[in-house]
Amino acid sequence: TVSELKATLTADRTVIPAGDSVTLTCSVNGSAGLQYEFLRSFSNTHQLQPFKAGESDTENISQGGVYSCRGWRPERNSVTAQSDSVTIQETVSIRVILLTYWSVIYSGEKIIVRCEIQGGGGTGWTYEWETTSINNPPSHSEYTISSVTVSHSGDYSCRGRRDYSLTEWSRVLRLTVSPNKPQASLTADSTVLPAGGRVTLTCSVNPSSGWKYYWYREKKLSEPLNRHDAVSQTTGTTSVSQEGLYWCRGGRGDPVYYTHFSQAVRIDTIVSNTAVVTLQPNWTEIYRGETITVSCEIQGGGDTEWTYEWETNISLKPSNQHEYRISSASSSHSGDYRCRGRMKSAQHNTTEWSDSVKLTVYDNKPRPVLTGSPSWLSPGASVTLKCEVEHPSAGWRFYWYKAVPDGSQRSYSYELLPGSSIGTEQDSYIVHGQTHTAGYVCKAGRGDPVIYTETSRTKFVWSGGEFVVSMFSHYLNSSMCFCLSNIS
């Protein structure tokens, strides 16, 4: 009989898309010619009530709820057993927003990820979360993470459920957790306090969402200078009128999460003393291997003791000493040098930077150029030799030599001219009473230890008379080439 049969209810889907419908189908096996009755309830606590009956075994619905059905024969007033219930949920057009305080956060921060349903009104919503992180949020509107880690990084979305209403999934929020605590950056519009004036400090954290800024003087963990100044905390700028060492850091959240401290910025007061860079020896152009001392002299009197600071554009940085001794110079020492002094008794009192001194170091030793005047002279006349060094600079002593043929007449040696064994300060030398053609060379040296130039090329001074042919033959036999145009 019909009463011994049980109906079956199926749905083509269990969630109704917004503005759409779901098709229910009621079937009873082993019996034909039945009519069908559909039942529903909009609450789990309410009994199912009939809402549609007829010959059709299908019904389109657009409301969420609990549904069931049964078959019946009107002429016999016989009804099948009621089908198992099917829960249908309705998607409502309510905006769901996933919120957090900021998208880039740092390991150790406390954050709250919040799901807000806008336009639905009322209460009674429960929440579902989807995330690609390995941590599953609870079924609440807020997901509080008291100490976030890298494992919380991922995409988050949520939706709300109330009775048989279901919202759409929210827009995806991508949460990025950096494992490294950020460091604040501190800049000053000047590192020197003007007389009676102030210096503006600016603190920043990148990215900058949500940060408040705190400044410290002398000690990093002292009371912040602006603890009660809400404006300077949020703008990231403050002004100071005291010299000293300053730091800053950013903080956000509750409890406050602090960044690393910035690098320190020193604000100084300028004293009246003057710093001057000096060179010993006082040569701004030197050659590879020479020795030179760069010194910082503080002028202006007083018995103050100083420490010294250097600035230079070379890779070899001077230490913070009074003198910088270069024992064997190379081209890597070429550059601009300047210095300043800082009082030992008051470390924030400093001189202005000195003027820069430019030091040039040539890698190759110079080769002097030797000239003689006149180039052609009568027997017994005097000739003046002149030795010139390229990149002229003070301090050279000059050494003079005469070319002396050896016994084979194929080469010659050099013999110091009288009075030049320790060098001459003058770059000229007079040879008195020359009676025959002769060759001369020179070189220069300076410093301690002495650095010598290359030897000049040989300079020949021609003398007339019977010596011309014999001397000319000797140098020709020595495979030396002369410029005959010098003989006039």
Image (cartoon, rainbow, N blue to C red):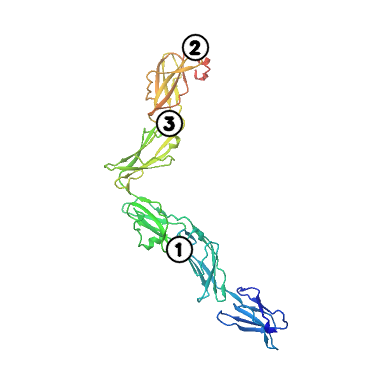
Q: SS at mark 3?
A: loop
> What's under tag 1, amino acid-wise?
Ser
Residues under numbered marks 1 and 2 in contact, where contact means CB atoms less than 8 Å apart:
no
Residue farthest along the left direction in this orientation? 303
**Residue at mark 1 to residue at mark 2: CA–CA distance:** 106 Å
> What residue would you read off at disc 3?
289
In the image, residue 129 above or below residue 123 = above
Packing grade of label 1 (10 A; few <14, some 14-19, many >=20) is: few
Label 2, on which residue?
A: 470
Q: Nearer the viewer, residue 383 or 353?
A: 353
Residue at position x 56%, y 69% from top? 169
Foreground pick, 9 / 332: 9
Observer able to see residue 412: yes
**Front disc: 1 or 2:** 1
In the rendered picture of this protein, how many numbered marks are placed on residues? 3
**Amino acid tagged 3:** Gly
Q: Amino acid at mark 2?
A: Ser
Residue designated by label 1? 146
Q: Earlier in the sequence, mark 1 or mark 2?
A: 1
Q: Residues within 10 Å of mark 2 (few under 14, many from 20)?
A: few
Name the residue furthest right.
32
What is the x, y in percent for residue 276?
34, 40
